Image: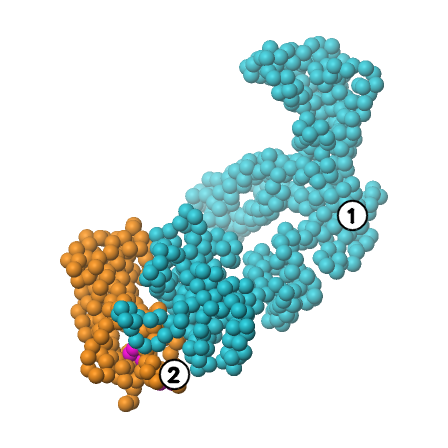
Chain colours: A cyan, B orange
Amino acid sequence: VATALAGLLSADLWHWKAIYLACKSSDPAQREKAKADYTTLSNDPELGKWFGEVKSTLKDANTDKIIGQIAAILVITVITAGVGDIVAAGALGWGMSAGSTALVVGTAEAATFTLLSQMMLDSNHSAGHIALEFGANIAMFGLMRRFALFAETAKLTKVQAMTGNVLIMAATTFAKADLDKYIADGRHLNSEEVGNIAMQGMVMAIAMHAIAPLTKPLFRNLEGRTYAFCSKLRANNLARVRLSEQALLLRGTKNFSEAQAYVAKERAWLEQRLRVLDEVEAAIKAETAGGKKPVEGGIAAKILLGETDLAALRVDLQGKLASNSDSGLLINLEPLAPGLYSCPRAHIADTARALGTVEQVSAPDPMTSVKEYTIRTADGQVVKIREQLPAWVSQPGGGRVTRSAINAGLTDALFNLPPAEINALLEADAAMIRGDDAGAKAALNKTSLSHQESARLEVQMLTSTASLRPKIYKLAVADVDAAVAAMKATGRLSVDITKVAHDAKLGRAGSLGELEAIQRWLDKGSRVEALPENQNALLPDGTTKKNPDYRVDGVITEVKVREGALNEKWIKEQINNANTQVKRSGHDENGSVELLLTTKDNGKVSLEDVDRQVKANFNNSRSSRLTRVSVFKDGVLFSEWHRVENGNVIRVYPSGASK
Amino acid sequence: MNQTWMYKSGCISFSLDLLTSERAEANVRMINAVRTVTIAMEMVARPVLARIGSISGGEDSAVFELPSLAPRFYSNIEHQKDISDVALDCDLLCLQSDGSSFQIPRAMTVWISREQLDDASPSAALQLQISLDVDIYAAVDDDVRDNRHLAALNGVRFNSFLATLVRTLPAQVTDVDACYHAPGLVTATGFALPNM
């Protein structure tokens, strides 16, 4: 069946290819002939028979009815796209504008689709039904005109190079997607899907019109030479190969940001190519300065190009660069609704100016700082472009950072920061929410903001994260008595903590840390038990009496406190100690350990350092009696790892895979 | 006031880096370290259980009661190239005021390990941790307990053990963890002895 179908589809029985090529011919007579041939073809009753063959081929295969219908519709899709392509190509050849091309394409496809679906799928051939179907199909293909408006807007700017083929490509993608949706769900694409498909079409168009794959290597026979420019030349030619590969990968993807990145890279590559050309010309001039005759004709003889050829090459490169700029401009616009587009903040001013006269710029939205530009295009249309906020703004942390920057009067500074610095700000926000103020400050210091700007932003960020910050468990010696009284008042403390409190009042960091841990557990509603405190002496059986090892909601919980600066092995050693202690508890049960870092030098402790130390001794083959390791820094949870069912250990806080 | 010392798991610990310039493989250096530690602790403690960890088998891949299984323990270390760590659980041997001796079971752990537990390199650096679960060597003197006498009797022996380790391994004390005690009571040379 596949072979038969392939034969039917590939035989070009209807000479569409010939018509298409004639359309593209520069010969007016050929184009007239193509026009006539297309009209004849459209009216040829044999065409209907041929569609019938396609249908019966599917039927002969005894294909399931529904699958057969879908397959048939897909065949129609291909065919209608083909018809549209011919019409569009013809329109170009006949000098029609991009907008009118889209209109013709839409109407032609709607008519053909109605005809074919009537012939092959629909048993209801009443005039009313056909009219209804035609209307529906017109509406469907009418959606394309919304897309065409986008192209029209582009056409009104300098982006002449992007009309024509780009429009056809995008429109075809769009039409196919709408058909697919209609077939699958019985409805047409909604506005969001239209936007997505339009973007997909544009991405494909960018890929199809990439400059690098159509460009030859520059001065390849100079690559192996030792001129100063040769390393740049080699790099540029290598970049051409890579860009060509990337352009190929871009086809068929919906990844708009990749397309944008591609255009930017291609621009950088073209600019570098122009600079190499400058250097080559300068080197040629130097070789011939003062009427000198270079050895073996010099560079000019090697590249076989004279002065005029080099000038032509420069013009060509400059043209390509302009075309690239047009591409860059076009892909900055994302259709939201008819006449309304969004554009990345960084490009909106240039894009708006290029589209026409900027009549109005709205006041920034107080929450998002977004502005809207109203532009009157050269032909009098009014279009609006809204600032598109970068994706990171939609993250919870991104929203807080943005609002903080607005409140700190740093909106422009924020949106001009490179991605790495934005990540640093998001890192600072996350650190503040963890209560890790030192970590937040360290992250803020990674940005290029001035000291004053950074301080202003920090104040606002602290305000915006205030309600999210955890309670800090940091007990002062003077507060021990009151804290112990409050702990006892909960009624969930089954342990005499007199000795711990006594030592805490002496300022012993270990005892203060234990009380802080007890406070935290009780605040969470846990029940805290411990063995009675004992000093001295062995029990009658010769074993030692132990001071409290806690049970929190029944789980053995070890507390280890680090008073000095964290070194490279403390966490590893304390995890080992805690694991040993749980083993020695005399019960066949597991436990957990809480490591409290209390030194003033904790600002230097990074998550990476802690992560590495924990994972070194708490993993699927070590510290098997521990199910949880938590690290607290300056009284708040800094990081936490859990042993999961398969015995592996995962970091659960901060979330995200540990490195 | 009859309360003197307290039990608290890992309440005091000393971390040491082994400074050996030997080119021997890690397991050979580890067996040498274990022998040195065992001899040095003779007056202070007695190992009763040895737990061997390996990179391939994880923690406690072999466990030996000591001294009865000491030959098998040493043999195991010798033949286990990817040994990652050895833990010696020890009973402390202490003196009382009247001159008699007593033991505190399993109150000290000596843990000798590769710096990075998963570093299989034969030249991996070794570390040692002495972890005490009692503070019998600490000259604590507050309104609840007075341990100065026991500290004077026993602290000197522990300090001697630590000094022997530093000299004979050789090793360097890199960290002292004693967050339940007053500053200066426990240092890199051991326990401050009381003025009695």
Report the side of A601 relative to A63 (left or right): left
Report the side of B187 relative to A260 (left or right): left
> Farthest residue in the bottom direction?
B196
Q: Residue at x 24, y 69 (%)?
A: B91
Note whether residue A358 is visible. Answer: yes
Residue located beneath label 1 in the image: A384
- Judged by its main secondary structure, the magenta piece is loop
- Amino acid type, label 1: Lys
Residue A68 part of the magenta segment: no
Position in image of residue B104 (x %, y %): 26, 71
Position in image of residue A108 (x %, y %): 76, 23
Tell me which segment is drawn in magenta: B135-142
Position in image of residue A41 (x %, y %): 73, 14
Residue B137 part of the magenta segment: yes
Q: CA distance from mark 2 to mark 1?
A: 79 Å
What is the chain identity of the residue bearing mark 2?
Answer: B
**In the rendered view, would you say A336 is above or below B125?**
above
Q: Residue at x 74, y 11 (%)?
A: A44
Q: Nearer the viewer, residue A90 or A106?
A: A106
